[in-house]
Amino acid sequence: MKIKLLDRYIIEQYLKTFFFTALLFSLIAVVIDFSDRLDKFIKSGVSAKEVIFSYYVHFVAFMNGMLWPLFALISVIFFTSRLAKNSEIISILNAGVPFRRLMVPYLVASTFIFSIHLIANHFLIPMGSKIRIPFENANVWDNPNQTRSRDIHVLLDPHTKLYIRNYRQKDTTALDMRIEVYAENGQLSEFLEAKRAKWIGPPDRWQLTDFVIRRFNGLKEELILNPQKQIDTTINITPDDLTRVKNQEQLFTSPELVKYLKKQRARGIGGTRIFETEFYKRTSEPVSIFILTLIGLAVASRKTRGGIGLHLAIGISLGAIFIVLSKFAMTFTNSESLGPIVGVWVPNIVFLFVAVYLVHVAQK
């Protein structure tokens, strides 16, 4: 479909209003965040250069990644309400332009924003998070690390299972470690149990104390007691596998996240739901830009006595409902009441029906 002068005008107004809104909210967010964390920055002794380039540059990108759909809704309502107030929308419709045709420049502009948002969510923002999150963990958060400390079950490989009853992060020591090795037929072939296992260093070196090994060959059993006080060995696990950094799911680009999830699932390490949710959310959020654009157009295209103020109130209310619904869905997803895909896409599906209805009843 050929882009006409009217299309160019609407696309230009949409993008100008959108990026101005993003800039305005970014400045407000930086001011609020800086005033809230100034004491932390002073106590940690970081320089102004580090605060700006290691934190706020990437903080602005991260915040925009979350709020661009809402900015799209506000932008569409703001400039479309202005067109409606000046009777431009009515003139366009009276000139024989169908409402569906009027939607085209809005969808073209939202496609441009969608493309940037999608690339940023999957690649650019995670790359920035590799700088921002370590800075936060070092200078803002008091306890950034979350360590699994009790009843840890891990698959070291398809035939080897590891169990740790207690793990102490402070001295990287595992208490009551057990390793079970299974043959191809699923029968237990070897069993190692150590009262204490201490991490020595990379690549996978552990020091076992007070251990016993049992090997099985049919009905025969070979027992190996600890002839020494200690023995060094390699076990395919490191303390990093048992420790999770705050907001760790944001550190991976999407290809890295897929690789990480595949590794964690293969090893039987639980707690991957938040990582799965993060992966699906990176696509669902950009898609919501299309839905909220249509909602904004349908709401703001009708000329009303309340004008821009009424339209903005309706739009912001719908945006707030969208955010609340998203938070509810995330809560149910993280509590395993909903699957990650369902929880992430439910708000979009619900608001897609809202968008279809509003477009259907919009002023034609």
Image (tube, rainbow, N blue to C red):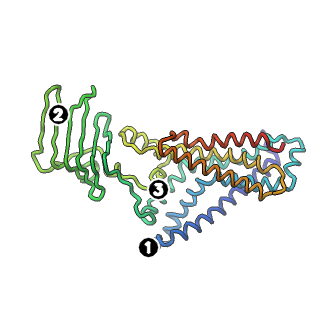
The residue positioned 51% from the left and 52% from the top of the image is 126
Amino acid at pointer 2: Arg
- Closer to the chain start, of discs 1 and 2, is 1
**Is residue 35 shown above or below 210?**
below
Q: Nearer the viewer, mark 3 or mark 2?
A: 2
Amino acid at pointer 3: Lys
Report the disc number at residue 203: none
Q: Are marks 3 and 1 in contact (CB under 8 Å)?
A: no
Secondary-structure class at tag 1:
helix
Mark 3–mark 2 distance (CA, rounded to whole Å):
45 Å
**In the drawing, does residue 79 fall left or right of residue 56?**
right
Q: Which residue is mark 2?
A: 215
Label 3 crowd (10 A; few <14 / some 14-19 / many >=20): some
Secondary-structure class at tag 3:
helix
Mark 3–mark 1 distance (CA, rounded to whole Å):
23 Å
Q: Which residue is mark 1?
A: 43
Q: Nearer the viewer, mark 3 or mark 1?
A: 1
- Closer to the chain start, of discs 3 and 2, is 3
Amino acid at pointer 1: Lys
**In the drawing, does residue 166 fall left or right of residue 53?**
left
**Is residue 8 shown above or below 140?**
above
